[in-house]
Image (cartoon, grey):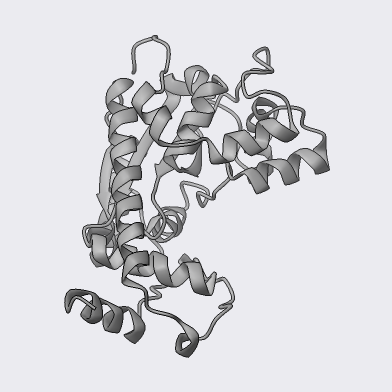
Amino acid sequence: MLAAVSMVVPPALRARVGLEHGERIAAELSPLAAGADRAMPGCGFLFLCFTNRCGSNYLAAVLAASGALNEAGEFFNADTVLSHAAARGFASLRAYVAALPALVGVPAVPGRWLAAKASVDQLMMLTDAAVLEDVRARAKFILMERRDRLGQAISRAIAVQTLQWTTLHPRAVPDEALVYDRASILRHMAAVDGFTAGFYSFFAANGIVPLHLVYEDVVADPAGAVRRVGAWMELGDLGFDPARVRIGRQSNAVNAAWRARFLAGE
């Protein structure tokens, strides 16, 4: 259990990473710190910390296929929060988080876990709203990374054009219409490194030791990844039903061609 000290956002991290989601939410609802009297749910919170195209959606699907966890979604995206707020009258981010277990279908009681994806700016947002302060004694963090940073950057560059972030999403642009841009790939690589460094900075400042998982290892042995998470969370020896995983890999010949062009200096 973590010590009862205030959660903080390192000043250097705050200066480098903007509160993209937090600013939008605060602009339409109340300030992030509002609603301090709103009690947080009694369930545990599993934060699946990610950078785009690190394989976090696949990991979320794999963990849900154990039957022990809900499928972690991007529940803290501004669009998602504001949509629920408009439909249900939530006046603050804390009111939304308080209702989140019911929205996801997770009992808000000790011993049950709500799994949710979180970017580094969303962890900062939840810190500013004192959500993490309130749930830190029953919170766990997984940091998902991809060993192949170039592959991740290429995948991001493609997804930005196709808008197909998982195989469940429609593809807005066909392969033949995609445009290779070396500068774009370099920007995506720098973004991944920057956000990953942000996670390390946030965890170090708050004494958090996350479970590290690597995309390539999860793909090679999803059942092993589920067992590892189950043991770490003290959920026992979790099983794994691959038939429940609805998404697959998106990499194709375009990814390979762009890699070859990038490595050739084009």
Which one is in front, 225 or 87?
Answer: 87
Which one is in front, 215 or 52?
Answer: 52
Res. 242 visible in picture: no
- Of all residues, the one furthest to the bottom in this rendering is 176
Res. 180 visible in picture: yes
* Left or right of 38, for residue 172: left
The percent coordinates of residue 263 (x first, y second) are 18, 75
When asked about the image quadrant of residue 59, the answer is bottom left
The percent coordinates of residue 2 (x first, y second) are 34, 17
The percent coordinates of residue 185 (x first, y second) are 33, 66
In this rendering, the answer to whether 82 lies above or below 67 is: above
Which one is in front, 225 or 34?
Answer: 34
The percent coordinates of residue 89 (x first, y second) are 82, 34
Residue beneath the point at 17% across and 79% down: 264
Which one is in front, 180 or 256?
Answer: 180
In this rendering, the answer to whether 156 lies above or below 212 is: below
Quadrant of the rendering where the C terminus is positioned: bottom left
* Left or right of 121, for residue 195: left
Quadrant of the rendering where the N terminus is positioned: top left
